[in-house]
Amino acid sequence: MTDETVECFNCGRANPEWAQVCRSCGVPLRHGQTRVAPTGRFPTDQNSLISIGAVIGTILAAVVLGIFISGLNPSDPSLALATPSPTLSIEPSIDASASAAPTETPAPTPVPTPALPATVVFGEELNANREVVTPVTTFTPGMTFAHSISSTEPFGAATIGEEVVRLNEDGTDGDQIVAPAANQLSVNPESTIAGFVAGDAANFVRDWGPGLYEMRIYVGETLIARGQFRLADG
């Protein structure tokens, strides 16, 4: 190998003497021929045209060869594009705690008040059986205050206690006892009916005042009946 160089007649670059193709433009070198500079924008001499044609032919041959080789390659990128990739389907998770309806606190079931074995009715007069003839709920001065107790079973005692309590206007217990249960009235132990006439309601209006009241009937300490009445000024 010598240090001599060959000048490319196409681009003018110096190449090693042994080079067959210009290392700058790729045109085959012509050993022993001097470079001919083109006179126009594009070379028109026969040798330059042949060189350019050779370069283009080389490029086309490389492209064709690449296409041929890619057709033999099983990992053709076109196949990868044609084959759809599997789609990962993810079902949305459902939060049961978020979709569940809020639990409502059930309302407490009211406990029914046990039925009492007797009833008390208010009126102005009693019949021969000691029962109220015409029930009355409101008493004013000048009216006779009377009441009767009817039981489903005999009283079983010689006396009963009557307690009178002043109520609030909404019917709730006002805890104001105007007549204590110590007030005992005589009854027939074997009877189921007892009636009493207390006199003019004006006495109660004067002593207790107008308002809503409840009378509670006891045999010993057992409550057997209760009923409400009202006192008014008139």
Image (cartoon, rainbow, N blue to C red):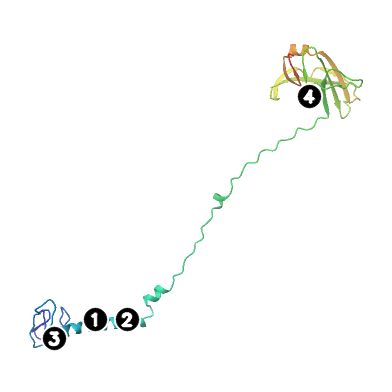
In the image, residue 122 lies at what x, y percent?
Answer: 81, 21
Q: Earlier in the sequence, mark 2 or mark 1?
A: 1
Residue for point 20% across, 82% down: 55
Residue position marked by numbered label 1 in the rendering: 59
Q: Comparing marks 1 and 3, which lies closer to the viewer?
A: 3
Residue for point 78% across, 24% down: 227
Horizontal side, residue 197 vs residue 47: left or right: right
Residue for point 40% across, 74% down: 80
Residue type at numbered disc 1? Ile
Residue type at numbered disc 2? Ile
Other-residue count near label 1 (Cα within 10 Å), few / some / many at <14 / 14–19 / ≥20 = few
**Vertical comparison of 201 with 86: above or below:** above
Residue position marked by numbered label 4 in the rendering: 227
- Distance Cα–Cα, label 4 vs label 1: 120 Å
SS type, badge 4: strand
The quarter holding residue 147 reads: top right
Horizontal side, residue 174 vs residue 64: left or right: right
From this viewpoint, which residue is outermost toward the bottom? 32
Residue position marked by numbered label 2 in the rendering: 67
SS type, badge 1: helix
